[in-house]
Image (cartoon, rainbow, N blue to C red):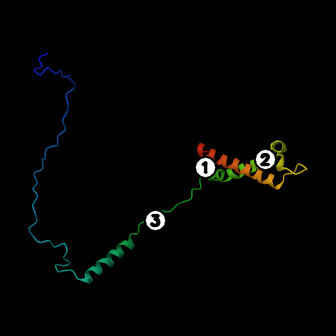
């Protein structure tokens, strides 16, 4: 109410302003007045022989301290072994189960009811029927693999 501009200001917690810390170093940095001698070997200008000897000594150092090669160690723990075996045997078991189910007489009679053209006169599968049965098995196995990937089993 005692605001001269007539605008209402809300009072909140005080705001903190971040500032850089003051520099408290007393050490001064000065340039070295002597000429640079890092490129000199033995107080003389380097020659080609100096460089080759330096490179040869560098190669020897590298050979003395080789970088250790990372080796993949096959895990022989029981849990990993059984997991590996179960992963490898799962697909053949599913194929065997599909083969069994698709050769049951119940499935053949159902197939004969819906696709009589796939059978011969003696209720034996014709070549077209075998192709149809193979396609059904392939589609069922593909569906199993897709479901397995989605669920993560």
The image's mark for residue 55 is none
Q: Position of residue 70 (x, y in %)?
A: 47, 62
Image point (77%, 54%), residue name: 131
Kindly identify which residue carries mark 3: 69
Give how far apart the Cα atoms at labels 2 and 1 are: 34 Å
Front position among marks 2 and 3: 2
Q: Could you tell me which residue is drawn at 10 percent across and 20 percent down? A: 4
Residue closer to the observer: 16 or 64 = 16
Question: Relative to the observer, which residue lies in front, 53 or 121?
Answer: 121
Element carrying mark 2 = helix
Q: Which residue is mark 2?
A: 102
Residue under the image location 18 percent in, 80 percent down: 45
Q: In the rendered image of this protein, does residue 78 appear above or below residue 6?
A: below
Taking the view exactly as shown, the residue that stands out farthest to the right is 122
Going 60% across and 51% down the picture, which residue do you hit? 80
Determine the image quadrant of residue 57: bottom left
Q: Secondary structure at mark 3?
A: loop
User: Which tag is nearer the camera, tag 2 or tag 1?
Assistant: 2
For residue 79, which numbered disc appears in the image?
A: 1
For marks 3 and 1, give the CA distance: 27 Å
Question: CA–CA distance between discs 2 and 3?
Answer: 52 Å
Count of number-bearing discs: 3
Q: Crowding at label 1, few (<14), some or many (≥20) Cα neighbours within 10 Å?
A: few
Q: Secondary structure at mark 1?
A: helix
User: Residue 118 appears at what percent x and percent y?
Assistant: 82, 50
Q: Nearer the viewer, residue 143 or 71?
A: 143
Tell me residue 149's x, y (percent): 60, 47
For the C terminus, the quadrant is: top right
Mark 2: few/some/many CA within 10 Å (<14, 14-19, 20+) = some
Q: Earlier in the sequence, mark 2 or mark 1?
A: 1
Residue 62 in picture, x, y percent from top left: 37, 72
- Dots 3 and 1: beta carbons under 8 Å? no
């Amino acid at each position: 109410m005692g605001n001269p501009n007539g605008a209402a200001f809300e009072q909140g917690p005080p705001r903190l302003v971040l500032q850089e810390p003051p520099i408290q170093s007393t050490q001064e940095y000065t340039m070295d007045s002597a000429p640079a001698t890092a490129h000199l070997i033995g107080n003389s200008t380097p020659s080609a022989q100096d460089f080759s000897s330096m490179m040869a000594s560098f190669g020897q150092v590298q050979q003395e301290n080789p970088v250790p090669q990372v080796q993949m160690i096959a895990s022989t723990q029981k849990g990993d072994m059984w997991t590996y075996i179960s992963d490898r045997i799962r697909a053949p078991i599913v194929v065997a189960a599909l083969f069994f189910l698709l050769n049951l007489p119940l499935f053949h009679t159902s197939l004969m009811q819906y696709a009589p053209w796939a059978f011969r006169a003696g209720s034996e599968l014709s070549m077209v029927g075998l192709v149809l049965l193979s396609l059904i098995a392939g589609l069922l196995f593909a569906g199993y693999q897709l479901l397995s990937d989605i669920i993560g089993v």
